[in-house]
Image (spheres, helix red, strand yellow):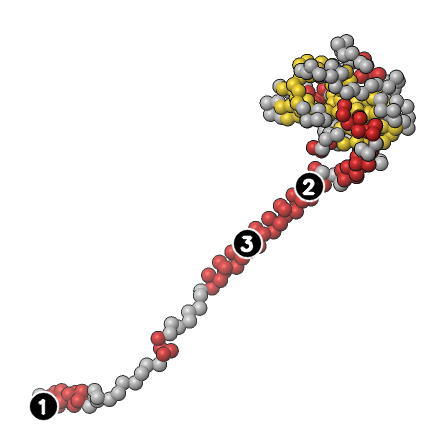
Amino acid sequence: MDEYKRKDIDNDLDADLIDFDAEEEEPDPEDFLAKEVKPPKEKKKRGRRRIGVKLIASLVAFMMIFQVFSAIPSSFPLQAADFLETSNELSQRSDVQSWKETVVTVQGAAAFDRSRGTGFFVAEEGWVVTNRHVVEDIAAVVVETDEGDLYEAEEIYISDTADLAFVKLQAEETFPTISFAAENASLQDEAYVVGNPLGFTRVANEGEVISSNDEQLLISTPIYSGNSGSPVLNEAGEAVGVVYASRTGTDGRQGIAVSRDQVFEEMPEEVSLP
């Protein structure tokens, strides 16, 4: 029993040895700082994956932008700048200015499509020659003159054998006209074209006749979308054909036109030529 008591006394003595009056040491400030914890390797892998996804997305976006800009030349050929410059030069001539007054824009809308082409007056009562594919299956055909006036079609005659159409406007006034040549064009004759290519209006261009027969002409004059229905004119400003298509030859774009003789064969009797 005494031995156990002695142990208890020793414990009490040890407790009495604690100095409560001693100054307490200030803790080191670094003890309060959070220890740096290294992120697990799994998070590092996720970070790399996110960077990879962003990089791929950036590359895809760049490729899409590149494709958009690379497609521009196909929708707006670089040669367009050349024919605009040529048109500006030709338009300084008084005869070319008078030709432009006879050229119109033919446009309309169908259920799921829109059409826009060229035409020109052949009779002062308001008869316009254009292409069949410009007005065929179009619900409402509207013609705009060089002065910006709009006219609806009153009558439309469409050829069954050639890409031609004849449109009579609902109008009481008279219009300036283009006369037809006395005969078909010959090889190497001048071939001027005035039309509405690529969204422009009354653009004049020049070339020459490459081949000619009773039904059509092949001309070196550059032809683009919107030129359909444009007049092909000789040096005297007389119509020798009506543009209806184009092709790419060894020397660039070329035009295909319905010949003067073919136009006369398809023309309605109601049209009174000057």
The structure residue drawn at horizontal position 21% and vertical position 88%, both measured from the top left corner, is 21
From the image, which quarter does the C terminus lie in? top right
Specify which label sits upstream in the sequence, 2 or 3.
3
- Is 145 placed above or below 33 here? above
Residue at image point 49% right, 62% down: 44
Residue of label 3: 54
Give the answer, above or below, for where 87 lies relative to 16: above
Give the x, y percent position of residue 15.
18, 87
Q: Is residue 270 above or below residue 101?
A: above
> Dot 1 lies on which element?
helix
Q: Secondary structure at mark 3?
A: helix
Residue behind mark 1: 2
Along the viewing direction, whichever of 190 and 114 lies nearer the viewer? 190
Report, in whole angstroms, how far the alpha carbon at label 3 lies from the one at label 1: 81 Å
Can residue 105 be seen here? The reply is: no
Q: Please state which of residues 124 and 202 is positioned toward the viewer in this rendering.
A: 124
Is residue 143 rendered to the left or right of residue 178? left
Residue 118, image quadrant: top right
Locate residue 248: give its quadrant. top right
Q: Check disc 1: other Cα within 10 Å, few if <14, some if 14-19, many if 20+.
A: few
- At label 2, which amino acid type do we have? Ala
The quarter of the image holding the N terminus is bottom left
